Amino acid sequence: MENFNNEELKTHLKILQELGFEEIILDKEYLPSEEILKEKKKMLDLINKEIQVCTKCDLHKSRTQAVLGDGNLNAKLMFIGEAPGEEEDKQGKPFVGRAGKLLNKLIQKAGHKREEFYIANICKCRPPGNRTPTLEEMETCFPYLKKQIEIINPSVLCLLGATAGMAFLGRKVKITKERGEVIKWQDKILLLTYHPAYVLRNPKEEETLFNDIKRAIEVAYTGL
Ligand code: URA
């Protein structure tokens, strides 16, 4: 790209305006990374404002607050769960309850920190009594997650549990059979694994979840 000083840039933009251009979409690569982060934060704040007043499904009726996501806005890997639980609904952050503590522990065991990654859910509001979200609730909320993925632009999505798998694949997922699978989804890599809450109920599966998380991190940082 050519370099202009401010005055030259103004003149150049004026000419483009006179030629009928109404907006210029800057290739993100030309923005310094602090600018990218600011821009991403701005866009996510807008989604957050939208979900806090969202009434597209009945889950809004019982929520304390909607929970957008948490973590590194430039993450290469995004962990995606099902929906906020009681603690998440209170604190406004995903995976801060018992399942979250296990997730943090396994990320640390793999030599990394939760803060390196981005964590979100399929549904942004807590289903009453922590029931599984309905297909309709997931479909209604999925566009918010899609926007988040577009903004953060990770290369790998680690789907925690059958519900997250189903939201992406559009079919029932038998997680005990399908976990560990690597699937192409748009320009991303999906990696299916157990939900940490399932592992809390089935502690002998902890090693498997750990290996899947480690693999997801490796794929995100070094490729397949
Ligand atoms: N379970 C989820 O699926 N998501 C959370 O944020 C917490 C528990």
Image (spheres, rainbow, N blue to C red):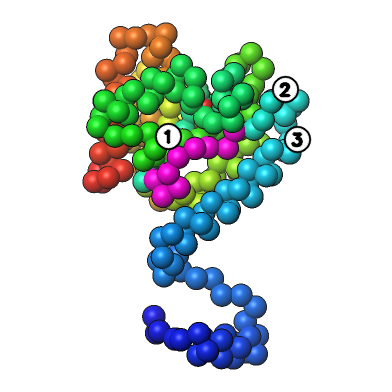
Q: Quadrant of the N terminus?
A: bottom left
Question: Within 10 angstroms of label 3, few (less than 14), some, or many (20 or more) residues?
Answer: few
- The secondary structure making up most of the magenta span is loop
Residue 43 visible to the viewer = yes
Q: Is residue 206 above or below residue 49?
A: above
SS type, badge 2: loop
Question: Within 10 angstroms of label 2, few (less than 14), some, or many (20 or more) residues?
Answer: few
Q: Residue at x 42, y 34 (%)?
A: 79
Sequence order check: which comes first, mark 1 or mark 3? 3
Return the x and y of residue 156 as percentages of the image width and height. 37, 42
Q: CA distance from mark 3 to mark 2?
A: 11 Å
Q: Residue at x 61, y 24 (%)?
A: 90
Return the x and y of residue 104 as percentages of the image width and height. 37, 26
Q: CA distance from mark 1 to mark 3?
A: 25 Å
78 or 138: nearer the viewer: 78
Q: Is residue 21 left or right of residue 40?
A: right
Residue that badge 1 annotates = 79
Q: Residue at x 57, y 48 (%)?
A: 44
SS type, badge 1: strand
Residue that badge 3 annotates = 55
Q: Amino acid at mark 3?
A: Thr
3 and 2 marks in contact (CB < 8 Å): no
Q: Is residue 108 above or below residue 20?
A: above
Q: Amino acid at mark 1?
A: Phe
- Bounds of the magenta segment: 67-75
Q: Is residue 176 left or right of residue 59?
A: left
Q: Is residue 66 above or below residue 154?
A: above
Residue that badge 2 annotates = 62
Q: CA distance from mark 2 to mark 1?
A: 25 Å
Q: Quadrant of the C terminus?
A: top left
Q: Amino acid at mark 2?
A: Ser
Return the x and y of residue 14 as percentages of the image width and height. 61, 88
